[in-house]
Amino acid sequence: MIRPKREALTAAAFAGFGEVVEVPEQGGRLINSGTAWRFDDVAALALDKNGGRALLSLFRVQPASLPLRCTRLERHPLSSQLFLPIGSRPFLVVVAHGHAAPDPATLRVFVTNGHQGVNYAPGTWHHPAIALDTVTDFLVLGRADARPDDNCDELPFPGEAVVEIS
């Protein structure tokens, strides 16, 4: 049984798994007669490899019961996948490294501040969205494929390891 500690989601800590998506502290440009700031390219999207196309979805995620027993993760080898909560709702982000399967020894658990999203890099092993305390809606930018299994690998941890997330 592996019991990783939660850590705050920061760009530096998450860099090996993808990008933190949040309003930048600087930059951008004023638009709409001065009523809005626009920030472009806040995440590196990879959605069109081998003829894929962008797919914008809404997910409604029920809150998890903690502790959560995590026995498997998923990855999207052909694309990035971006999760952005609608509203100010913290959520958990569970990721791991690994080639053929997720490596439980590399598992990390991040907690967002409610104003952050994540953009998983192609091939990043991750747990499905984990809402905390309340139902949470997410805007999800992923890839449309002819068949759902074309770009989603879901595997257990080697040796049937179990990770308990509290």
Image (tube, helix red, strand yellow):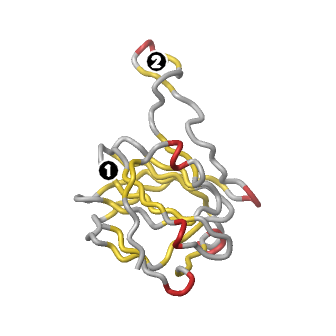
Residue at image point 49% right, 18% down: 31
Q: Are marks 1 and 2 in contact (CB under 8 Å)?
A: no
Q: Which mark is residue 32?
A: 2
The picture places residue 146, in percent across and down from the top left corner, at 65, 69
Q: Is residue 131 left or right of residue 158?
A: left
Give the mark count.
2
Q: Quadrant of the C terminus?
A: bottom left
Q: Is residue 113 left or right of residue 81?
A: left
Residue at image point 39% right, 17% down: 35
The picture places residue 120, in percent across and down from the top left corner, at 56, 55
User: Which residue occupies the foreground of this view, 155 or 61?
Assistant: 155
Residue at the extreme left of the image, as rendered: 133
Can residue 42 be seen here? The reply is yes
Q: Quadrant of the N terminus?
A: bottom left
10 Å neighbourhood of mark 2: few (<14), some, or many (≥20)? few
10 Å neighbourhood of mark 1: few (<14), some, or many (≥20)? many
Q: Is residue 81 left or right of residue 133?
A: right
| Amino acid type, label 1 | Pro
Q: Which mark is residue 90?
A: 1
The picture places residue 145, in percent across and down from the top left corner, at 64, 66
Q: Quadrant of residue 155?
A: bottom right
| Amino acid type, label 2 | Asn
Residue at image point 34% right, 44% down: 113
Closest to the camera, between mark 1 and mark 2, is 1
Residue at the extreme bottom of the image, as rendered: 159
